[in-house]
Image: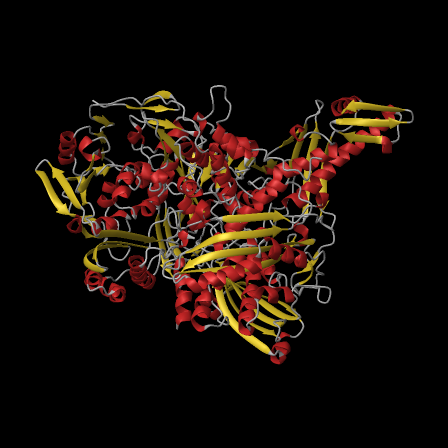
Amino acid sequence: MSVHKSVRHDSALKHATGQALYIDDMPEPAGTLHAALVLSPVASGRLRKLDLTGAASMAGVVATFDAGDIPGRNSIAGPGKEEPLFAADRVEYVGQPLAIVVAATLDAARAGAARAVIEVEETDAILDIATALTRRAYVQAPSTLQRGDPEAALKTAPHTLSAEFSVGGQEHFYLEGQIAFAFPGEDDDLVVHSSTQHPTEVQHVCAQILGCDFNRVTAVVRRLGGGFGGKESNASWVAAAAALAAHRTGKPVKFRLPREIDMIATGKRHGFDYRYTVGFDDEGRVLALDAVLAADAGWSLDMTPGVIARALTHVDNAYWLPHVRAVGYACRTNKQSNTAFRGFGGPQGVVVMEDAIDRIARHLGRDADAVRALNFYDEKGDETPYGQKVEENHLPRVWSELKREASIERRRAEIAAFNKTCPVLKRGLGLFPLKFGISFNIPHMNQAGALVHVYTDGSIRLNHGGTEMGQGLFIKVAQVVAEVFKVDIERIRPTATSTAEVPNTSPTAASTGSDLNGWAAYEAADTIKQRMIAFAAGHFGADAGDIEFADNAVRIAKPGSNQVISFNELVKLCYLGRVSLSSTGYYRTPKIHWDGVAMRGRPFFYFSYGAAAAEVAIDTLTGESRVLRADLIQDCGSSLNPAIDLGQIEGAFVQGQGWFTCEELWWDAKGRLRTVGPSTYKIPGSRDAPAIFNVTLLDNAPSKEATIFRSKAVGEPPLLLATAVWTALKDAIASTASDRRGDDRTAVRLDAPATPERILAALATLKQ
Amino acid sequence: MTDRIRFILNDSPVEVADVSPMTTLLDWLRDSRGLKGTKEGCAEGDCGACTVVLEGGDGRREAINACIALLGQMDGRSVRTVEGLAGRDGAPHPVQTAMVDADATQCGFCTPGFVMSAYAFATGGEAADPGIIHDALAGNLCRCTGYRPIVEAMVKVAGLAPEPVSAPPARTASAAFDGTFFAPRSLADLLALRARHPEALLLAGGTDLGLLASRGRTPPKTVIHVAYVPELTAIDDGKDEIALGAAVPYVQATPVLVAAFPALRTYLARLGSRQIRTLGTIGGNIGTASPIGDMPPVLLALEARLKLVSLRGPRELPLEEFFLDYRKTALAPDEVIQSLTLPRLWPGEAFFCDKVSKRRDQDISTVAAAYRLRLKDGKIEEVRTGFGGMAATARRAPQVEAALLKGDFEGAARAVTRDFQPIDDWRGTAEYRLHVAANLLRRLALRVADPEIPVEVEAL
């Protein structure tokens, strides 16, 4: 078997030896130009003057381009939406691109950009969610997800609680910054190498900016040095700016954003403010939830609608909510336009009920883990608020396995004892159950194509619409193809994603990479295989059903004789027999449908489940914290590649931990982002990962739906498992009140990121 | 007459011509030498994707950030990049194999930097202890893996037998590259240059100055590289005092300092990263006079004295009198810091220091505090403090000290607001700084009362 095996990442040795080529490492043809951006220095206003003559006169500068130089449409958004590549009139955030300076060297381009003269008539800027809500400044109308009658249910509920809290945004901090390298060709054709998760959008946006047909632009992606959602839409405008410069100068143009510019100019994870009221009975059973989720969309629409939809469809998380209303506001602020980030609103959705259950448990003096389990979806209530049946429910199973494997009961007692004796340090334990929906919320995006060639030497070339950004998609899909042909994985050559090979693709996002492209590649390979079988049947006079591929060979079973020929031999015979050894493959996810206005349907092909327990320690004097241990169980169905999936789970968890703890975006009063590099924006380092880190893939859990080899998606779900860290921190903080007052009933508001400062502030509120 | 920069790159001697000595090592490797394995992730010495290793004639291997190292600094050094790790037969280095076998690469962009940090660690004879491994990795960021497999690879390669290295080219006379990068080899030459070029920036390790060239893209016009002046690189580990040359890098100062002041072990391990501490110097940390430099609070508490020299002669100045205002010092345009002197602790004296930051490793302090106390029968007889992140410069806290002398820790905690009016920024609000500085004094009280009580999360 090639699948369900820990096959190593195809580029691992190249990564370790420095031989893996990223776009910045590509050989530069003679005459290659470099580019740098001119950015808005103010958050909101009218652009009165943009004088680039100083820039143009600098040594080495070849040209400057602003909105007026765009031959096509000055928009990087899809049809019907307007998001300018370069601001022409209004400026909407500090860091908004105004123009590009193209020069013989990168330093000359940057020096030129620094010489731009910009005059903006400043207008009042909206810099936070609260102000946007007050002014009803939205990038789209509020969305409501509702079931039943939450108002009535809240009125009759034995208990109700209301709370507010907020979570911050998150910088993607892909190690390789945004980059594109555009090569002009004849007849104004253009090839652009882009570090993008969405080659097709790069193609479309470049064509839109240049005013040409899509067939003139080819987007190519060999690998990304990390994406995490940050190179889904943002990579497109970077590529389009490079394309514009290449088109106008007739020279290859390399355009790389330095880290500081990357962080200033590009969107991030949406921060959210929350307000909710929850009603429940004496045992902690939730009867109704009324919640407001207000997202900081930044200045433009970007992918905010999808993020809001996913947040709303994940408010329930693992819990049956008989009556619920969740309203999502997409607040327009004069900041970077927030965008996709691993989890895509899901993490911002599930925190509502996690916070609510903690408060319920403390209010009733009950065990929060038990209250969680009490509210899990089960046979009695098994339909989500948006009308999808909760099938293949692994929640009870992952929960009991987690509690057993992580010795939760014993450790709760140990921690309580420790907290009683240690005056300064407090420990806390937090559990989290996960249900995460897999598929793009927009049904039409759930399609994929692949292209497989079998050459006459028996080697196989694989291409598909998914991009390789470290997640191991190329090796997983290669495993699928090897499995179809029953050949060694070494024969399969995954190749750079290209809009010229597989057109009209969806972004590699929403965890769907291997689900979609795995099936598409399967279909392509199987088409070729069926042709080979049909040919062999005729050639050898056998029944098609008696021809079997195995171990790089083909067995032709005939009455009285078994003939075995090598895969290579059959390939050669097929070629001589004039059989096509190349095929496309296509897949569309079945069963899904979605009404985005009513917020009802079956948006997800299936659910992924998981559970996490995190133990933390806090310093009550400084607010510093540390994750001592994490135990995770993640449902990957029948994993295509357990080693790759393990890496995804661990990496996602630590990334989520960073979002909840140390990663803080900080804008000053003028709307300038001041955390613009790793010296000021702190992602977790090796010491921050849980000191004890136990991760298991849920075993013996093949997907019930017909996913590729019964595997499940893994990219995003485990990021949400880090919610356990946030819950554990609240547990540790609350322990200071219970130690002092002798009760466990004090709930804690802890906004994320839970920096030392926020933890200390939360501790201070308990003392009052 | 101009000299050529000469050094060893991946076992081969190189001589640099027609490239500015102010070029960063990273740009030169990638653009002039076509060695693309070393990556730019941040251009500010914080992500480690550009990590390369300096190899000393004595067999030492130390990681540095190529993005903030200037080419002129490499003169006389021996540099190894990820491309130079393969064996003669082209086989990958055991460190590379270990990273591959542990599934420690995902997107791969940070990997060459991790490989180089791992190489320096592995050949340095250190134990496969998780704490040491995290120290070794503190200067490298990975956004994909969550680090567990990288740490696993590090465990496997710990204690690799180092291979002999070729000795770097020796240079004895002062050198000048391109007429802008001066590398004196004697104090006399240094002082003469300093008098002649008061506009020149003094370059010691360059871990701050290098940012001008890397992130800022406007390298200094003239620098005087002080790293090879014997008087500035001497360590005098005396009976009563320790004298450290201003250009002694942290990596060399650390053993001496930790032996004298054990509380600095953790503190110095959290100062920058190994990459930073290979080149960074205490003299540089003082000279830049940053309000959030990690060393000034410690040195204030330890009653450091500076020796400043110029052609006019030497003078000595207490460190307290050196910091005038935000990034303003008492250093005259023709002067250099030659060394600093620290009195050792007397019997009965104790030294404590703390740093609070958003992330444990490789972060700039929000607040730093240091205290030297003379205790007799549990009573504080003498005290000196140093606080960072609380004012425009690192400063002592007189009212806090007065309260401590009365044995009133709670009073000292409350006195913080009288001594300091800090500002809000991305590292913390003024309110938090005041709160946490006061609480650090409460932590001090606990430490003095009972050193066994765990007061740091790292202790668990």
- Residue that lies at the very extreme toward the top in this rendered image: B89
Determine whether, in the image, residue B295 is placed left or right of residue A611. Answer: left
Scheme of image coloration: secondary structure
- Residue that lies at the very extreme toward the left in this rendered image: B312
Instruction: List x then y, in percent, for residue A263.
Output: 43, 49
Picture quarter containing residue B123? Answer: top left
For the point 29% across and 46% down, the residue is: B262
Establish if B136 lies above or below A136: above
Establish if B192 lies above or below A50: above
Establish if B168 lies above or below A5: above
Q: Choose between B455 and A43: the one closer to the eye.
A: B455
Q: Choose between A266 and B342: the one closer to the eye.
A: B342
Quadrant of the image containing the C terminus of chain A: bottom left
Instruction: List x then y, in percent, for residue B308.
Output: 14, 41
* Residue A18 in sight: no
- Residue that lies at the very extreme toward the bottom in this rendered image: A156
Quadrant of the image containing the N terminus of chain A: top right
Determine whether, in the image, residue A232 is placed left or right of residue B427. Answer: right
- How many marks the image carries: the answer is 0
Establish if B209 lies above or below A574: below
Instruction: List x then y, in percent, for residue A414.
Output: 50, 60
- Residue that lies at the very extreme toward the front in this rendered image: B377
Q: Choose between B218 and A522: the one closer to the eye.
A: A522
* Residue B165 in sight: yes
Determine whether, in the image, residue A294 is placed left or right of residue B452. Answer: right
Instruction: List x then y, in percent, for residue B6.
Output: 30, 23
